[in-house]
Amino acid sequence: MINRLATRDPDFTRSLAALIADRATATDVAAPVAAIIARVRAEGDAALLDLTARFDRFPITLDQLAVTPAETAAALAAIPADQRDAIDLAARRIEAFHRAQLPRDFSYTDDQGVTLGLRWGALDAVGLYVPGGKASYPSSVLMNAIPARVAGVARIAMVVPTPDGIMNDLVLAAAHRAGITEIYRIGGAQAVAALAWGTASIAPVDRIVGPGNAYVAEAKRQVFGRVGIDSIAGPSEVLIIADADNDPHHIALDLIAQAEHAEDSQSILVTDSPALAEAVAAALASALQTLPRAAIAAASLAAHGAIIEVADRAEAIALANRIAPEHLQIMTADPEGDFAAIRHAGSAFLGRSAPTAIGDYAAGPNHVLPTAGTARFSSGLSVFDFLKRTTTTSLTPAALAAIGPAAVTLAEAEHLEGHGRSITARLA
Amino acid sequence: MINRLATRDPDFTRSLAALIADRATATDVAAPVAAIIARVRAEGDAALLDLTARFDRFPITLDQLAVTPAETAAALAAIPADQRDAIDLAARRIEAFHRAQLPRDFSYTDDQGVTLGLRWGALDAVGLYVPGGKASYPSSVLMNAIPARVAGVARIAMVVPTPDGIMNDLVLAAAHRAGITEIYRIGGAQAVAALAWGTASIAPVDRIVGPGNAYVAEAKRQVFGRVGIDSIAGPSEVLIIADADNDPHHIALDLIAQAEHAEDSQSILVTDSPALAEAVAAALASALQTLPRAAIAAASLAAHGAIIEVADRAEAIALANRIAPEHLQIMTADPEGDFAAIRHAGSAFLGRSAPTAIGDYAAGPNHVLPTAGTARFSSGLSVFDFLKRTTTTSLTPAALAAIGPAAVTLAEAEHLEGHGRSITARLA
């Protein structure tokens, strides 16, 4: 059902290493992706139409490439009111949290008379990749598009494939709510190539974000440098630190919510309570019985899930820092205090009433988060992904006279005489 | 000497495109780099010693791998006092500017009773690659290491190859001033592999920054994901917007300072004054006559340099935004006003007394900057490269009751029933 480990086990270090070993399955699609990108660069729209007919089994003409406002309006009308309201609540909360992230410019003149500044600016244009078919999630549209809007990106171009002609109304509704008016029904490496290089119908963008399959991920890697990209997300994961004072049924459901994503998802409970460990293990079985995606969740729990017993709080914290989980739930008597000792986590959910699922949809913080331990050095999607900085330097002649000679000394030491002369000439 | 263009030329668009075409020379070293990384992962220190003996022609033993405090002290003693002072002045100024960048955590409780926060944290360990031999620059050590220190990175491990046993005293002195105490005399792809994967002697890091040759750049690409990396810098460049009221000699020296870096550097002057264009072109020739690196600078100016005449200020601004230069100098009557219209530039130097060279060494802003138009979507090195964010979510039971149902609606719409149940169970 789920793996059981304890830090007191003699082979714990090895068991843990095996548990958190890379779960991502690498598919080498570099060559076919390179060929697709080259074709789109050479043939533009014609290649897009042809590849869409082939890969999505959906022949479209050039004037069907873009989703029309009428189609979006129809999608909006087609979804139930409670879904429309839920999208609106989520959008408002995501917007508020990302607005709070907006950084401030600064500028100061120091005692040498040098004025230095830093100015943030939005990217001009962003491409948003949205998967089609079964993995088409309106929540992802909100989580990717809203930070870009809040950052001030003027143009967001969304691509979403329509395999066999099927388009998800909720995805269109979420795009509408996020203010996206430019949507193309294309996907795969060809859509990434079109966003990066542009075609007659699709203007190029500056950065491409959003999840996708192995072809999309590889295409993003290959266009990186021409445009910016977000990080390539691995399988999703949660680590829950819980003390004895918890409802085991809640924790079982939290583990299952993560496990139902995919078989390579990972759900880990860390607890200093053997009784809770037992109770959660028992609760898992009953909770799975009525779950629609029980087969996926059970496979994930069996292969990658674990209940880990620790001796104390310190061991629990150390484990979380070692694993650097994408999602961290702290269900203890002092969640804020325990979080203060956490160094690495993508997003933390503090207390007994904060399941990860609330963050997946409606809390406000982003659900696009670093996986596979990359929270050690990277962060979830934010307004910072859609902003860039320009630093500014301005000097009075006196300021240049004050700090110029040091620069000249260093330039000469680096044998860059010309650098020094561009300063010295102004000191005359 | 230097290319001459004007926006009024009938073929200007094509000439400009040719001028700013990608100057980076791609060297495909993927296979040898992959082999080196695999060897270091498999053999650890033994591979490091062997590869260092081979590529750097410098056989070292395991206990010579790390530079000793005594060796650093000797390097410090060996350099002239004015160089020591210049390093100190530059370090203090870089430190002050990067300290001003440090972002603030935030936390708020909204009207639903949801408490949301964002906490910044430093990376645990960073690797700093410093090129050896002729391209060994103490200024780069300061520019890469100080932002990491200011961000709060506890461990900075520096690698610097010593080809034929030669170590640059200034580089060691700069490392000392930046507070780096862990230095290894290794380089190339093998050093990157050691930093990413660790060996018995070198603990792994979380992110690797710093410039390097094609092997180093490719190695960074290949270890990306395992660790974070900085962007791969292309050839350096400056764009100067200048009105008639400038000393042509100063501008010629600024163009030459950029051109002397390497033959693939790019120096562009944009001016609405035909007289200044003529005068700068004339000044270039005389300024080159006594320059030690005249051959490199002349080759760069001839191949990639340009003086571009524009009709007015608007055309100059549009050109800068089109090119998105790494360094931008604005030498006009209203540099701040003109900068307000600039959307894309790595670092801007405002006014007639702010040559790019002052920013290369001592102004304070970072000299590691986006090249080749990537300022459209990326930024110079900063404390943000050494920080990551964790978002926090905490809810009262009432808050979960308020926003939970919307999340459940979306979860069910996405066919993730388990997500919904983890919320619903808590609402009972």
Image (cartoon, coloured by chain):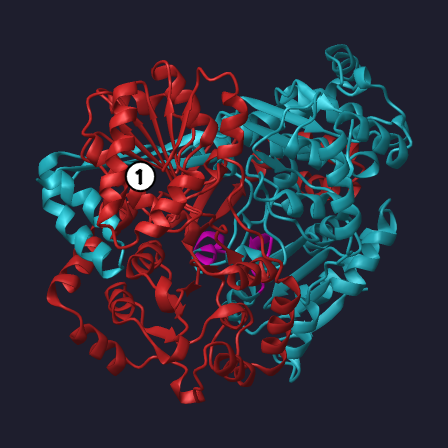
Chain colours: A red, B cyan
Q: Residues within 10 Å of mark 1 (few under 14, many from 20)?
A: many
Quarter of the view holding residue A57: bottom left
In the rendered view of the protein, which quadrant contains the N terminus of chain A? top left
- The x and y percentages for residue A373 are 48, 36
Residue pictured at 33% horizontal, 47% vertical: A366
Residue receiving disc 1? A255
Q: Is residue B101 above or below residue A332?
A: below
Query: Which of these two is toward me, A216 or A117?
Result: A216
| In the image: residue B53, left or right of residue A14 | right
- Name the chain under label 1: A
**Region in magenta:** B323-339
In the rendered view of the protein, which quadrant contains the C terminus of chain A? top right
Residue pictured at 69% horizontal, 56% vertical: B248
Q: Secondary structure at mark 1?
A: helix
- Residue A4, magenta (yes or no): no
Q: Residue furthest top?
A: B70
The amino acid marked with disc number 1 is Leu
- Residue B324, magenta (yes or no): yes
